[in-house]
Image (cartoon, rainbow, N blue to C red):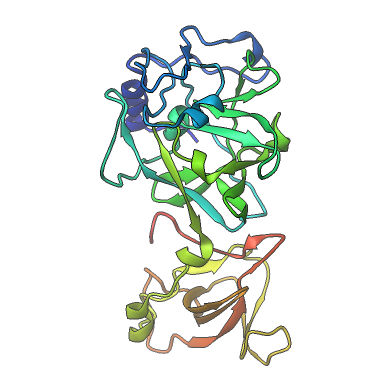
């Protein structure tokens, strides 16, 4: 997928100039940053032009976990979204900064697209409280053992909202998150751990959104029982038939089978099970007929291998 014109404008503002040419993985090792910014232990510092930026408010401990120098920002020219495991949630871009001034916005402005990667910095670990393996920095992957080499990041993203792409979180353990940053990579095969304390080092802040929170019921829609506004969720695998059951159990009585064309409205979540209303065929944002059936029952909505089984249209209707 190619960038829109507005994305280019944002990147030009972020870098205060033209971005560097995109490198291929084969030539990445020969492209080093022309004007790197050196990270020191000082409380504040002035970022140089055309360098990846970090927040001046980060702690000394966070700064010590960064590479000694940061490369020029590189905006990903494409992304990979083919994935079987959607995990427990995603990392939402919750705030953005004024790139030129380096001042964080007080408003929760949603940063469209995936150009935020060019100003995002994430230390990567092999396990919770484990060894620092490297960094995602400014659109590059940098190994801790070879900090002089920068490999272009080929991000593995999910579209979480309108014109918004971000990383899938596979699991959570105390203050640590395991996430997939690439289909394959030098560090952890594209999967790594990150501390929640390090989600706001760059000029873009990230925050965990769990699917169990994202799929919470909308009481107004469910109480109206209007098929035209019900069913914003659906099963990701449209080629599989799913069971709507009387109770949250694999052995419960079958109410109906859920086929390819359907909409799901969440009513209640109990662990891996969800009480729902199912509209078949799907009428959400399409329109219903007087005899459009609405069934109520329980579905299995997630497991450990695939994460959530459900999805939605991030662009709305």
Residue 71 is situated, as x and y percent measured from the top left of the image, at: 51, 16
* The quarter of the displayed image where residue 13 is located: top left
Q: Is residue 280 left or right of residue 43?
A: right
Residue 92 is situated, as x and y percent measured from the top left of the image, at: 45, 48
Q: Nearer the viewer, residue 204 or 220?
A: 204
Q: Nearer the viewer, residue 158 or 46?
A: 46
Q: Nearer the viewer, residue 6 or 35?
A: 35
Q: Quadrant of the C terminus?
A: bottom left
Residue 167 is situated, as x and y percent measured from the top left of the image, at: 54, 44
Q: Residue, x 38% and y 29% (percent of image)? A: 55
* The quarter of the displayed image where residue 3 is located: top left
Residue 117 is situated, as x and y percent measured from the top left of the image, at: 47, 32
* The quarter of the displayed image where residue 301 is located: bottom right
Q: Residue, x 44% and y 69% (percent of image)? A: 232
User: Total label count?
Assistant: 0
Q: Residue, x 32% and y 34% (percent of image)? A: 97
Q: Residue, x 58% and y 36% (percent of image)? A: 155
């Amino acid at each position: 997928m190619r960038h829109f014109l507005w994305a280019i404008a944002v990147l030009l503002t972020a870098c205060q100039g033209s971005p560097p040419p995109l490198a291929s993985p084969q030539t990445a090792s020969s492209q080093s940053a022309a004007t790197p910014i050196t990270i020191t232990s000082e409380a504040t510092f002035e970022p140089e032009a055309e360098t990846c930026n970090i927040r001046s408010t980060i702690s000394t401990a966070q700064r010590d976990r960064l590479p000694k120098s940061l490369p020029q920002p590189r905006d990903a020219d494409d992304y990979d979204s083919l994935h079987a495991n959607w995990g427990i949630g995603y990392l939402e871009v919750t705030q953005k900064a004024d790139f030129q001034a380096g001042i964080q916005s007080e408003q929760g402005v949603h940063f469209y697209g995936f150009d935020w990667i060019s100003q995002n910095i994430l230390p990567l670990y092999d396990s919770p409280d484990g060894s620092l393996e490297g960094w995602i920095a400014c659109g590059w992957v940098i190994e801790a053992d070879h900090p002089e080499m920068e490999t272009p990041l080929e991000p593995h993203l999910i579209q979480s909202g309108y014109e918004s792409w971000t990383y899938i979180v596979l699991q959570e353990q105390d203050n640590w998150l395991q996430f997939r940053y690439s289909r394959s990579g030098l560090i952890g095969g594209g999967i790594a751990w990150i501390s929640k304390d390090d989600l706001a080092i760059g000029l873009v802040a990230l925050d965990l959104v769990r699917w169990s929170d994202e799929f919470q019921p909308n009481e107004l829609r469910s109480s109206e029982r209007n098929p035209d506004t019900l069913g914003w969720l659906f099963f990701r695998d449209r080629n599989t038939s799913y069971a709507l059951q009387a109770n949250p159990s694999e052995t419960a009585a079958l109410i109906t089978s859920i086929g390819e064309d359907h909409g799901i409205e969440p009513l209640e979540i109990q662990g891996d099970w969800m009480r729902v209303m199912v509209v078949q065929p799907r009428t959400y944002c399409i329109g219903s007929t007087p005899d459009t059936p609405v069934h109520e029952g329980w579905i299995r909505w997630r497991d450990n291998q695939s994460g959530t089984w459900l999805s939605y249209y991030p662009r709305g209707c």
